[in-house]
Amino acid sequence: MTTRPLKDHGAPAPHLRTLLRGGGVVAFDGSRHVHLKRGDVVFCGGRIEYAGPQWVERADAPVHETIDTTGKLVVPGLVNTHLHVTDTPFTRGWLDDYASSAQAGAASNVTALYRLLPAVRAAALAEDQLAAAECAFSELLLSGSTTVVELGYDEEMGDRGDMATPRAVGDIAGRLGLRCYLAPRYRSRYWKLGPDGAPAYFSYEGDGLPRMRACVELLGEIHGTHQGRVRGMLAPGQVDTCEPALLRATREAADKTGYLIQLHAGQSPSEFRRIRQQHGCTTLEYLDRLGLLGRDLILGHSMFFSESGDVDECNSVELQRLRDSGTHLCHLPWVKARQGTVMRSFAKYRRHGIQVCLGTDTYPFDMFNEMRMAAAMCRVADGSPQAVTAAEIFHAATVGGAQALQRDDLGRLAAGCQADIVLVDVNRPHAVPLRDAIQHLVLSASAADVDSVFVAGRRVVDRRELVYGNLGDAVARLAEAGERVEARVRVE
């Protein structure tokens, strides 16, 4: 595969207007996505001017380029609000099927989180992490994600938390044309297995505050770079690895800078029990006491806000506070489903009026897979095919993610929005006849159906090939990095 010319990395010329015509369109009517079997989308200067039935050209708005979308479905770019690109490829194969030698699911989870993951991450040096990022960002674009939230790691990685690494990761995303929120992590303590074989916590110097200050400084340098497509986000690690002082400092920093926050919370029953034992309250009550809840906060995983994980067993007052605060929950269905756990449930959170978005977390970086798993697992958890609709899931993968990022210009095809657009091939056996496009996207489509991708009106994937990257080279570099990392892994 040859590298396409590295043309202009800037925004499209403001006077050039592009018309997408010939295929179906999933447009946004102000409140929901609507499938038009034949429709047009017009964008100019990186913004959508029109999405609807046939566009009528005006003398004062000439079209300079028409792209034939016959056999395609024009859809909004997917918003992936939680992922880890620098370690994920190296954990593949280490964590799969790890329960086979364990006697109980709880034991296998301990092995994965506290024994295997730290060992693999410690073996990945900076050059390995950057190879992983290049390949992961390529996969994301090729599968229709146009906006992503990359949650980096700290001193547990082989580069010991060198801030040059997340800076370079942001530059890779920007070069490829992706819209990326960069969130380097900081924590008060890290976890691994202790001498007795049980999970143990070990404190960082200064309880994580020096690292937090370094992260905030980096965000100030990268926020708004790459024509505004790369932005910063605050990322305290997990609710159980952060001291109250660190979380309070995070809230102060967010209020001062305007950066959004994402925190891993509700990830496991053991986390819920630890918060209750240490602070005498539930996880949600703890976050509320610290003043962390708010519309600028995303809680990653959000599966165990009761010890059982059943939303019906959560405190109703806490759920109301969660809703009224505007806090967003990020659902990561596949990573948990392959470990034998489901959110109980997406539908129950939504019935309480709580906002939910979607992310991939780890492999594969494929939002089509996550949408399908979110729909299926919700129906399994609730024991009903009517528990959730495909439209609700697609909304979470687009508008829901945009709302979590406080962006009313993403996740939808409507006038004034960013021209983040995906062309999905529907001239395929599993797509015809196409009666309901949104059901198809959620329940039948796959990443392989993505034909072309535009971010801010600039084509970054053209007929399944990267415009600003070389996938073959990226895959080869990552394969080499994988061999280096595997050779360094030392499991204690």
Image (cartoon, rainbow, N blue to C red):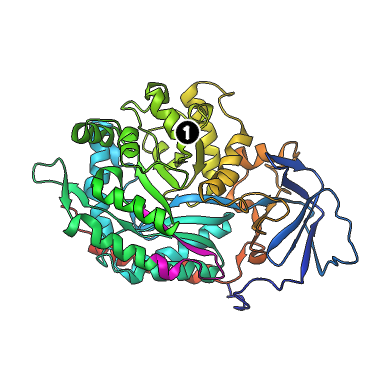
Q: Magenta residues, as a range?
A: 219-235
Q: In this view of the protein, which residue sits in the foreground, 191 or 232?
A: 232
The question of residue 38 being in magenta is answered with no
Asked whether residue 227 appears in the rendered view, the answer is yes
The x and y percentages for residue 371 are 55, 41
Kindly identify the residue that appears in the image at 72 percent across and 36 percent down: 436
Q: Amino acid at mark 1?
A: Arg
The x and y percentages for residue 105 are 28, 33
Q: Is residue 110 left or right of residue 474?
A: left
- Residue 417, picture quadrant: bottom right
The x and y percentages for residue 272 are 28, 33
Q: Is residue 278 left or right of residue 263?
A: left
Furthest-right residue in this view:
59
The x and y percentages for residue 116 are 25, 50
The question of residue 221 being in magenta is answered with yes
Q: Which residue is mark 1?
A: 323
Q: Is residue 318 left or right of residue 354?
A: left
Binning the other alpha carbons within 10 Å of mark 1 as few (below 14), some (14 to 19) or many (20 upward) gives many
Q: Secondary structure at mark 1?
A: helix
In this view, 201 is above or below 157 = above
Q: Is residue 304 left or right of residue 61?
A: left
Furthest-left residue in this view:
195
Kindly identify the residue that appears in the image at 76 percent across and 72 percent down: 15
Q: How many marks?
A: 1
Q: In this view of the protein, which residue sits in the foreground, 275 or 145?
A: 275
- Residue 304, picture quadrant: top left
Asked whether residue 486 appears in the rendered view, the answer is no
The N terminus appears in which quarter of the rendering? bottom right
Kindly identify the residue that appears in the image at 75 percent across and 36 percent down: 435
Q: In this view of the protein, which residue sits in the foreground, 222 or 109?
A: 222
